[in-house]
Image: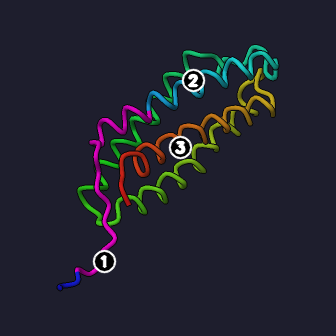
Amino acid sequence: MNEVPSQKSTRRHRSVSVRGGVAVVLAVLVNAVLVVGFGSLNIAPGFDALTFPPVAFLSAVGAAGAAVVYWALSRYVTDVDGVFVRVAGAVLVLSFVPNIALLALDPAATVLGVIALMVMHVTVAVAAVWALVYWGSEQ
């Protein structure tokens, strides 16, 4: 009997576009729930960044952008999942900078409001990493 050497391989059952679509829908839905929750807590009255239209739009753009980055990485690197997770983490940290700047630039911004925005950024990153890296793969 011949033994076949064990190799770690990842088999994808769903395309990047499908997984990216799932990331977009998931990010928008979860952040919509957060907008309602944060709104009911009244943590930043008048802070337009915590309203549904910009949150939904920017959540969708962020998740779709992640899918494009994942697709591009899959063309050039062998460990696309590992590199993507590192890139997503770096982009997440960098995405906090404009939120912090809002404290100085927007008089309606509160510390809790900015933290809420940061939580929403984390939501988009988690949705994108989960959908693109972990959902639809068989380890």
Between 81 and 105, the one nearer to me in the picture: 81
Pointer 3 local density, CA inside 10 Å: few below 14, some 14–19, many at least 20: many
Report the magenta residues as a range.
4-23
Q: Who's the residue at 23% across and 80% down the image?
A: 4
Nearer mark to the viewer, of 2 and 1: 1
Instruction: Name the residue beneath numbered marker 1.
Output: 6
Residue 25 location, quadrant: top left
Pointer 2 local density, CA inside 10 Å: few below 14, some 14–19, many at least 20: many
Label at residue 55: 2
Query: Where is residue 58 drawn, in percent x and y?
Result: 50, 28
Find numbered disc 2 in the image and state the secondary structure of the residue it sits on: helix
- CA gap, disc 1 to disc 3? 32 Å
Q: Are marks 2 and 1 in contact (CB under 8 Å)?
A: no
Instruction: Name the residue beneath numbered marker 3.
Output: 125
Q: Is residue 64 left or right of residue 34?
A: left
Please name the amino acid that badge 2 sits on.
Answer: Val
